[in-house]
Image: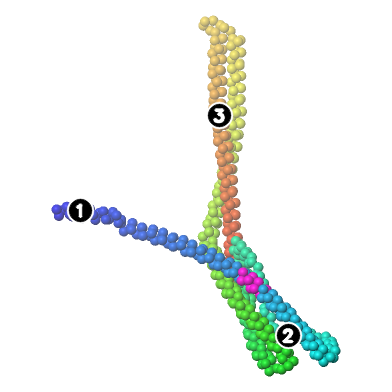
Amino acid sequence: AKTSLLAEYGAADMKYEELSGTPQEQKLANDNNAAEAKKKQEARLAAEKKASEEKAQKRAEDEAKKKAEKAKQDAERKKKEEEIKAKKEAEKKKAEAERKKAEEEVKAKKAKEEAEKSGKPAPKQAEKPAEKPAPPPPSPIKAPPAPEKKKQKVKPAVKPKNPSEAATFELKRRDSLKEELAAAEKAKSDAEQKEKDLTTGLEQAEQDVKKADEAYKSAKGKEKDQKLKELKAAREKKQSTAAAKASATAEIGAKKKELNAAKREVDTNEKSLQASKQAAKESLQKFRDSQKKALEQSLEAAREKESKTKGSVEAATRTFSEAGSSLKSAEQKAGEAIKKAQAELSQAKEAVKKADPGNLLFSPKKDAEKKEVEKERALKKVETAEKEAVGALKKAVEQAKKDEQGAKKAEADAAKKLKDAEASLAAGNASESQLQEAVNKYEPKLFFGLF
């Protein structure tokens, strides 16, 4: 039983080792898991960065829309207020004129009744001298005009792909944003100064109202009417000054928002500019450290390949030419040999015709016939041999032609690769020059040297 338990424990240990794996396998698995986790984290960070940029852009667009809408609403509100104020002024003047007219009619009627009681004719109303136009009331401090409706922002120009041009673009953009920031700071300062001046003016207007009110209360008779006019003018001035101050206070809030937006724009642009500068420096260093060397090596290999293919073409052309000459010479020799054999056969046939039949022991004709057969065999042998020789040479010529065509194709391919390699290196050098120009623009004080 003890032996059986030990065996079971041993089997369990072996199974555990199989499941858990060797330490090397565990380390490899852990490394793979760490690499996957790192990739996931990088992907997540990139996604978060992109989402953050899109969110910032959307927020900026929303703020611009809100500003435009608010400016529009403020302008409409101001316009309505001015229309209401003008209407009230007109109604007030009309009521004042009607009141004066009614007072004059009452006075005239009263005088007429008194005259009738006394039996005296009613005195004619003395013609009123032409009323002098009342002096214009002191002009109140005008409220600032309603802000003009802002035009929708034009989409910013796309940054050029050329690194040098991109650097110029970003630097100009930075200068422009700094100018806008300075203008926003000045506008805020001007608005604050305007509010300060209007605050002083409002305090003075309140003092004027207080004095006018006291003067009106202490005035008597005709002087009371004049003091009432002065009190009304003082109150109107106070109201207009208060409205102007409220508008100036609101304008300060708007200018503060514009200033904060300008600061954010400058900050965002500066971060983008620094990132572009760093990217240009890294790209330049990477090109000089590895990419340029690889391009130069590719160009050198392409030149060697093209040189070899040129030699191969020359050799193939020479072989094709020599094969053609050999074929031509062989065809000429074959023709001559066949003609010679045919002539000998013809002579043998003529000899057969002319030969004497002879007798059983000696027959020149039979000898001539044997010779004719030999000449026929010789002709066939020559024809066969020459045909085989010429055929072999024709195959050699065809092969030489194929070899020449293949060599020329290889030469064309090598020439194209050489051209591509030269273009790639030229493009790389141009990119290097553009990157160096970009770095010089980003860091003009460090013009000499690598960076």
Tell me whether circle 1 and circle 2 mark residues in contact (CB < 8 Å).
Answer: no
Q: Magenta segment, which residues?
A: 69-79
Q: Which residue lies under the disc numbered 3? A: 391
Q: Which residue lies at the image location 54% right of the left edge and 10% below the top edge?
A: 366
Dominant secondary structure (helix, strand or loop) of the stretch shown in magenta:
helix
* Residue nearest the observer in this picture, 405 or 330: 405
Q: Residue at x 54, y 67 (%)?
A: 56
Q: Amino acid at mark 3?
A: Gly
| Circles 3 and 1: CB atoms closer than 8 Å | no
Q: Which mark is residue 137?
A: 2
Residue 9, percent from left and from top: 21, 55
Q: Is residue 260 above or below residue 298?
A: below
Residue 117: % across, % down: 81, 90
Residue 423 pos. (x, y %): 60, 54
> Which residue is depicted at the point 46% across and 61% down?
43
Judging depth in this view, the residue of 65 and 309 nearest the camera is 65
**Identity, as a three-letter code, of the amino acid under mark 2:** Pro
Question: Splitting the image into 4 quarters, where does residue 248 fall?
Answer: bottom right
Mark 2 Cα-neighbour bin, 10 Å: few <14, some 14–19, many ≥20: few
Q: Is residue 202 magenta?
A: no
